[in-house]
Amino acid sequence: MTDGNEDFPAGPGLDTLAGRIADAPRAVLRVDAAGRVLEASPAAIALLGQGGAALTGRDFFRDLVPGADVPRGRGRFLAGLRRGGVDLRGRFALDRASGPVRFDLRAVSEASGTGALIGLSSPERAFGPGVGDAVVLRRKRAQAVDVSACELEPIHVPGSIQPDAVLLVVEPVGLTVLACSANAAEAFPGAGPALLGHALDGLLPEAFVADLRGAQIEDRLGDGRTVSGTVRLDGEGGSAFRAVGHAQGGRILVELEGLPDRPGDFGPADPLGAGPAMSRLRAAGSVAEAAAATAREVRAITGFETVLVYRFDADWNGEAIAEDRVPGWSRSLLGLHFPASDIPAQARALYVRSRSRFVTDRDAEPVPILGDARLAGDPVDLTFAQHRSLSPIHLEYQRNLGVNGSMSASIIVDGTLWGLLIGHHRRPHYVPPEARASAALLAEALAMRVQEIEGRRLWEAQQAHLAAEGRLVRQLTRSDDYVAALTGGETTMLDLFEAKGAAVVSADRVTVVGSAPAPEAVLALRDWLLVAQPSDGTVYSTHGLPAAYPPAAAFADRASGLVAVFVDEARRNLLMWFRPEVPSTVSWGGDPRKPVAPGRGAAPVLPRRSFERWVEERRGFSEPWVAWQLSFAASLAEVVEGVVLRQRRTIVELTGLLADKERALEQKDVLSREIDHRVKNSLQIVAAFLQMQQRQTRDPEAKQAFAETSARVMSVARVHDSLYQAENVEDVDLGQTIESLCRDLSGMAGDGQTVGITADAKVMVPYRKAVALSLIATELVTNAFKYASREAGGGHIAVSVSDQGEGRVRVRVCDDGEGLPEGWVDRKPKGTGLGMKLVRAMLDQIDATLEVANAPGACFTVHA
């Protein structure tokens, strides 16, 4: 990239303007060491859109050109001042009502060394009168176009990246550079396209290249997995870059993002961590509360002016279900819906694979990828590139929405794109890598919390329906009339699926229960289903019956929602459930019928421009059905089929059917195991956060406290893991649990220390006792690590678990140290004493006893 500042040569060239800035024909400013404007030429005043008096004293980077408030802009300016000489150049953008204006910036130190001179020039034309004229015209056409054009946009191969990073595309065998971004000189001064053909180990530090090779050999670079690290490309005192490498499309891609010279240059030196935020997220009791907490925490971490949680429905329309924003934000999006065309299918697919994106400056000029002509027919796949440039359609969408800086993080629940965590800023907005990582981590945490909350709600609903269906099956087995059994017993079809009405069609006889259409209307509906449904179709469902079957408009108040199940192959018997109309209004962010407009050039279609609240009244729709309800309806029909075909079957046959159905009730055990699995995963995340905090803490006592707390959390997690794997969901294999726990704790042992365990097979204990004994074992083993090790190393801790019969077990932890001193019970503990307090509390909970002896090392035996 040329610097575009031929009128502003390096060093003294700009400095010669020191005495005549007010008369300079080009855009020139003098700033102090903090970047505040001291003086500006008329052309600079015209460019920056401020009156002369208002310009003086303003922060050039933060107030006037926020697109340059990034490491490659203000970061290099500050680094140059510290090192005794500013030498900054780069291309940046200004947002204007008529469109973005891009310019080249050149800054050098003043001769006095107290500040700098900044020159601005346009690669398109000189700045002067009329600088506010349109550079990119806003398109105002609104005629309809083929929305499918959006679906075909190749957003994963844009051919360019955002300018805040340098991209190297590397051949995977020899690690030679096949292609690079046109701004390669940002990281490798003077190199540019000459990098092509260079070996990577001649460009990047040896340690990073070795990590990259190792990950490649171990197949740890695909599917978005990365190798990352901080590298300095020009010696220990040179500029730092965040290097991230991954494999995609048979190539290795390395992104080099410039880092601030000092952590405090952009945001606090110690950024807000995700640990406290995670605790607040865990305290949320509903999806709405969890989403609101996440939006609040992410905005605090990233500094975006607004952060919202956007949830998809079954048709991929989106709704803003939570929002946190600054008071001055122009409009609230909370509660608004957005049509599926706003985020096309290929964009949603990309969100599943590449789960976070940050855009500092929407209007920054994309940097093209330069490379061997052989790549022309096989463009570089940037699916997982963190700095992939945005599509022209997306850029125009953001302009229409009034957004410049942005972020998006995917919320993936059960492998499906559940929603997005979205950050918006009206001006360019830089987020440091640490804060970006914390925001992405909170998106993952929200996904897990949503899965827990919705999983629990689903489990409870399924349990209630399993019980009701079980009662219906028992009634069917005792009755020769299946219609009476379903509609006239203590439990009826109305007890399933939150239905308000139901009907059974047997031949041409109709029996209705609850709020349902008249029998003749039910027969007409049956006749329509016989034609509309394929001959092999068994289950039909809709929550908008009048739209599919217009005569249903006459009884929409009773049957806007329908589940219908044919019982037999002849389709003479039919079960139906009805839900009433739920009149509602849906507030859309703009008219959903006008999603795009035609464009030209780089953007063949343009997104809609209006996001004003647009209210749609919805009639003829019920609450939607969910998939498991349809499955339950089909299973009930299978039972009814047996009654229809063999009304007089023997009691033995009916008992067999009842047994089959009651086995379905055993699904609660499976669901209980799933809950244990999720609890274990959540506890492991908590332990991971504690370990992260341990690594960031310098105080030895605090580090030890975090390590011990992490071990305690993991001990409970191991119990839930054993429950998940056990045959009996009520009891835990204590030997297996403590064996796994000891493997976890062995990572805390010092050099030369070992942990051995012996355990009887199948020592099964109740969950409550397993938790207590696991915590006790954790405390005794960790105490042995701290106090029983020998100075020369080589210490060994022996753990055993044995079955004592009649439900009693023994757990023993012995070390080969010097043993406990006389009167140790009455001595003041070496540490806080919390560990032994916890041991005694757990002993009391399960009515256990503790024996202590020297044999010759300390030996603790628990009888429980």
Image (tube, rainbow, N blue to C red):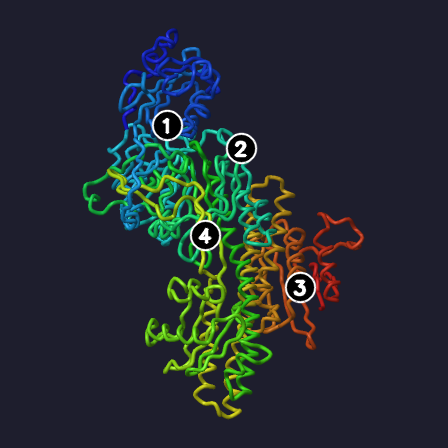
Identify the mark nearer the N-term, 3 or 2: 2
Image spot of residue 599 (x, y percent)? 27, 40
Q: CA distance from mark 4 to mark 2?
A: 51 Å
Q: CA distance from mark 3 to mark 2?
A: 43 Å
Which residue is drawn at the image coordinates 35% and 18% (left, top)?
119
Mark 1 or mark 4, whichever is nearer to me:
4
Q: CA distance from mark 1 to mark 2?
A: 33 Å
Q: Give the residue at mark 4.
A: 617
Checking the image for residue 96, the label placed there is 1
Q: CA distance from mark 3 to mark 4?
A: 60 Å
Examine the rendering and report whether any part of residue 253 can be seen.
Answer: yes
Image spot of residue 666 (x, y percent)? 54, 75
Mark 3 or mark 4, whichever is nearer to me:
4
Q: CA distance from mark 3 to mark 1?
A: 67 Å
Q: Quadrant of the C terminus?
A: bottom right
Q: Are marks 4 and 2 in contact (CB under 8 Å)?
A: no
Checking the image for residue 269, the label placed there is 2
Q: Amino acid at mark 4?
A: Glu
Q: Are marks 3 and 2 in contact (CB under 8 Å)?
A: no
Checking the image for residue 773, the label placed there is 3
Q: Secondary structure at mark 3?
A: helix
Q: CA distance from mark 1 to mark 4?
A: 37 Å
Could you tell whether 98 is left or right of 449 in the image? left
